[in-house]
Image: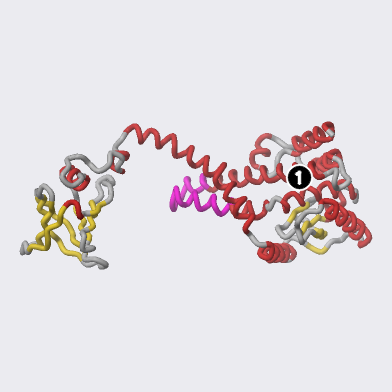
């Protein structure tokens, strides 16, 4: 059998057309058009990857040159045979999988299951590992820059009376001390904001910010604010910020790897899916922070009912919740969280 291919010199993109003559256990190369003998190569010395569709077969010669040839079934079988044998090297080649209806159907089922497994189990597990290796100094730098950026955009200095801030700060310090957590940077700050409303958030270095609107919503109630503080401490203690960052980066990388550079409707779909995925991660983290608050309430001189009361105050300022809001919200339903806190109170 005679074939026409391209011979690439080792380590170069330069190539020439060659004629391949197939014998039982060897391949002979001639140049085109003068048919100068270029070499004889035993089949056992050739290295080649499995067949992939109708792509040309690439064959590495023992001298480092690379041969590229558009093969037919005869050449494919010849290349895939062991020396002196009529049997192919492996039944599980890419070509056999590609042309198998059974594997094609299986891939339609297995590919989505693989993605679900990656998003649901692999990425969160990797994020926990990632968060544990981030040094505190890096968290502190990131937190300071984040708060500085917020202070120049949506946050403003607190308008609360100094005595209120001092009283709450002292109460919060007692909560920090009672928990005896191995964290060097817990502190609380107050800010005024129109954009965020009644809210509190934690930064990775242990800085916890309360908005004036939240303090006013609970009528300066130190007990309710301390209960909310426990929830935010849970975010810091469980390293949720670092985990969410890792999950977001990993999710983006996985989507890009599997789907490449997509556009149009599919790009819009993937963007919406990514948002929902991140929100589900966030719901999980919020639930973990709630569990931390309920588990450490007694140590901080509080009760689960205090946490329920704080959530009820937040619920009074929130719009009525619906099932669609539950899907799209980054926080679990307030009603469910209140019921969980009350159940914890009843079990005490």
Q: Could you tell me residue 121's position as x and y percent? A: 56, 42
Q: Which residue is mark 1?
A: 292
| Residue extending furthest toward the front | 84
- Residue 218: x and y in percent read 87, 47
Q: Front-most of 44 and 101? A: 44
In this rendering, position of residue 308 left or right of residue 41: right
User: Could you tell me which residue is drawn at 78 percent across and 51 percent down?
Assistant: 199
Residue 319 shows in the view: yes
Asked whether residue 149 is in view, the answer is: no
Residue found at x 59% / y 43%: 276
Left or right: 232, with 47 as reference point? right
**Image point (58%, 52%), residue name:** 248
Q: Quadrant of residue 185?
A: bottom right
On whether residue 261 falls in the magenta region, the answer is yes
Residue 58 at x, y percent in the picture: 24, 54
Secondary structure of residue under mark 1: helix
Indicate the quadrant containing the C terminus: top left, top right, bottom left or bottom right.
Answer: top right
Q: Across the whole image, how many numbered discs are drawn on residues?
A: 1
Is 78 placed above or below 138 here?
above
**Between 76 and 168, which is closer to the camera in this rendering?**
76
Q: Is residue 117 above or below residue 20?
A: above
The magenta stretch is: 247-270
């Amino acid at each position: 059998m005679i074939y026409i291919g391209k011979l690439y010199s080792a380590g170069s993109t330069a190539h020439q057309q060659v004629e391949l003559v197939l014998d039982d256990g060897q391949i002979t190369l001639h140049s085109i058009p003068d048919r100068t003998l270029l070499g004889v190569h035993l089949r056992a010395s050739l290295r080649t990857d499995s067949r992939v569709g109708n792509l040309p077969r690439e064959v590495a010669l023992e001298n480092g040159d690379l041969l590229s040839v558009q093969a037919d079934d005869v050449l494919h079988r010849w290349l895939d045979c062991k020396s002196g044998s009529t049997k192919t090297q492996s039944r599980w080649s890419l070509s056999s999988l590609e042309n198998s209806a059974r594997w094609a159907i299986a891939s339609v089922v297995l590919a989505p299951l693989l993605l679900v497994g990656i998003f649901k189990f692999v990425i969160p597990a990797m994020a926990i590992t990632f968060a544990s290796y981030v040094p505190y100094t890096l968290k502190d730098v990131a937190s300071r820059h984040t708060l500085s950026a917020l202070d120049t955009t949506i946050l403003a200095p607190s308008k609360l009376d100094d005595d209120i801030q001092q009283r709450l700060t002292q109460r919060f310090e007692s909560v920090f001390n009672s928990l005896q957590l191995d964290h060097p940077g817990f502190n609380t700050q107050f800010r005024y904001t129109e954009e965020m409303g009644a809210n509190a958030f934690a930064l990775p270095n242990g800085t916890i910010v309360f908005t004036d609107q939240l303090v006013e919503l609970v009528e300066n109630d130190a007990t309710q604010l301390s209960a909310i503080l426990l929830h935010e401490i849970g975010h810091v203690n469980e390293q949720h910020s670092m985990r969410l960052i890792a999950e977001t980066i990993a999710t983006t990388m996985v989507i890009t790897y599997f789907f490449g550079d997509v556009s149009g409707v599919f790009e819009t779909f993937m963007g919406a899916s990514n948002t929902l995925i991140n929100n589900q991660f966030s719901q999980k983290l919020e639930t973990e922070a709630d569990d931390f608050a309920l588990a450490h309430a007694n140590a901080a001189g509080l009760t689960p009912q205090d946490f329920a009361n704080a959530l009820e105050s937040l619920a009074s300022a929130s719009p009525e919740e619906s099932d669609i809001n539950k899907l799209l919200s980054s926080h679990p339903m307030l009603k469910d969280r209140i019921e969980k806190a009350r159940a914890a109170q009843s079990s005490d």
